[in-house]
Image: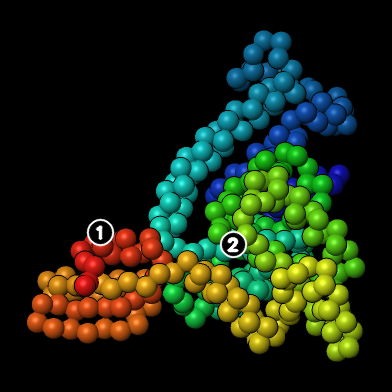
Amino acid sequence: MDRTMVILEIFHRHARSRAARAQVEIARLGYMAPRLREAAKLAGPQGRQRSGTGGRGAGESHTELDRRKIRDRIAELQMEIDAMGTERQTQRARRQQGVASLALVGYTNAGKSTLMRALTGSEVLVANKLFATLDTTVRVLHPESVPRVLVSDTVGFIKKLPHGLVESFKSTLDEALDASLLLHVIDASDPGFERQRQVTDDVLAEIGAQQTPRIRVFNKIDQVGDANRQLEVEAQLRASYPGCVVMSARRADDVAKLRSLILSFFQKGLVEAELFVPWSAQQLRRDIYARCEVLAESADESGARFRVRAQPSDIGFLHECGATAAS
Ligand SMILES: Nc1nc2c(ncn2[C@@H]2O[C@H](COP(=O)(O)OP(=O)(O)OP(=O)(O)O)[C@@H](O)[C@H]2O)c(=O)[nH]1
Ligand SMILES: [Mg+2]
């Protein structure tokens, strides 16, 4: 197996969603097709002996037939993916309405899934092996906050990802493209972390995400050495990367600090507003509590008044649903 086949095999084993599976298969077929002649030669005369009765055209060799089948299969998979794409886009559009989102990106094995689990209290596959995560997974920042923050985990980056794979895995990075904030997780304990950071930055630029605000998170600081060494490395990192976070996903305090930082990023855009909800529309009360931080609530004979803090889009949504601006 060459490097591409190894990567494909790893991707194949870890693909879970239909979309990811189809993409892996396309990449695999696309990679195999031009190599069939070689494979046939290696297989010896038997490889060519099967004589054609079925769908095989006159004069069409065995390899040509296989290639045609592969092309058909790729086209079929591509159609499936395109269909799933529109589905995903609608899901995404719905999600984006007034929802804050961040994506964890970074080199494979940096600790993205571990952080995801720590930040969202969810069970996400964490494994000390390359490409533990292929699909993107989306969870809500926990405990729930205003605004609600969606956290997505992404497939790990590697250097020199074969071109065909970059294309076919773009959709697994959709979440990263959609996110309003990227957490770039870097394994500070890996001697090659600088290069890994560079690879991730390059890939993000390639997929058009270089404009998205990002926080660099140097993880696994607990693993760089004793307490003194940890402080030393932390100071160096802070000097080289202003605004970065240096932490260990295994320390609850560090995770809590990261959560506060994330929230302060998303709460910057919040506005305060007064909402009035007539008694006839009290079902809105639940939406208000779900979407806003309620600072004060009062009631009189006509209805309830809320002073809230929320994203402008959420206030707009509540107005559309029948809440009016209270005087
Ligand atoms: N010591 C230490 N180990 C960590 C820390 N964070 C993660 N790990 C370990 O690093 C390994 C990889 O963690 P994952 O969270 O699976 O890494 P990932 O970035 O999701 O990897 P891929 O899904 O392959 O891209 C696991 O064995 C984790 O337990 C940390 O802060 N300190
Ligand atoms: Mg992972």
The residue at which mark 1 appears reads as: 320
Dot 2 falls on a residue whose secondary structure is: strand
Image vertical order of residue 26 relative to residue 202, above or below: above
**Quarter of the rendering occupied by the N terminus:** top right
Image vertical order of residue 313 relative to residue 160, above or below: below
Q: Is residue 302 left or right of residue 67?
A: left
Q: Is residue 41 left or right of residue 24?
A: right
- Contact, CB < 8 Å: mark 1 with mark 2? no
User: Of all residues shown, which one is farthest toward the front?
Assistant: 327
Q: Position of residue 276 (x, y in %)?
A: 21, 73
Point 65% across, 39% down: residue: 26
Q: Residues within 10 Å of mark 1 (few under 14, many from 20)?
A: few
Q: Can residue 258 be seen in this snapshot? A: yes
Point 66% across, 69% down: residue: 113
Which amino acid, mark 2? Leu
Residue 302 quadrant? bottom left
User: Which comes before the other along the chain, label 1 or label 2?
Assistant: 2
Q: Which mark is residue 97?
A: none
Q: Is mark 2 within 8 Å of ligand 1?
A: no
Q: Position of residue 322 (x, y in %)?
A: 20, 64
Q: Can residue 119 be seen in this snapshot? A: no
Question: 230 or 325, which is in the foreground?
Answer: 325
Question: 131 or 267, which is in the foreground?
Answer: 267
Q: Which mark is residue 181?
A: 2
Q: Residues within 10 Å of mark 2 (few under 14, many from 20)?
A: many
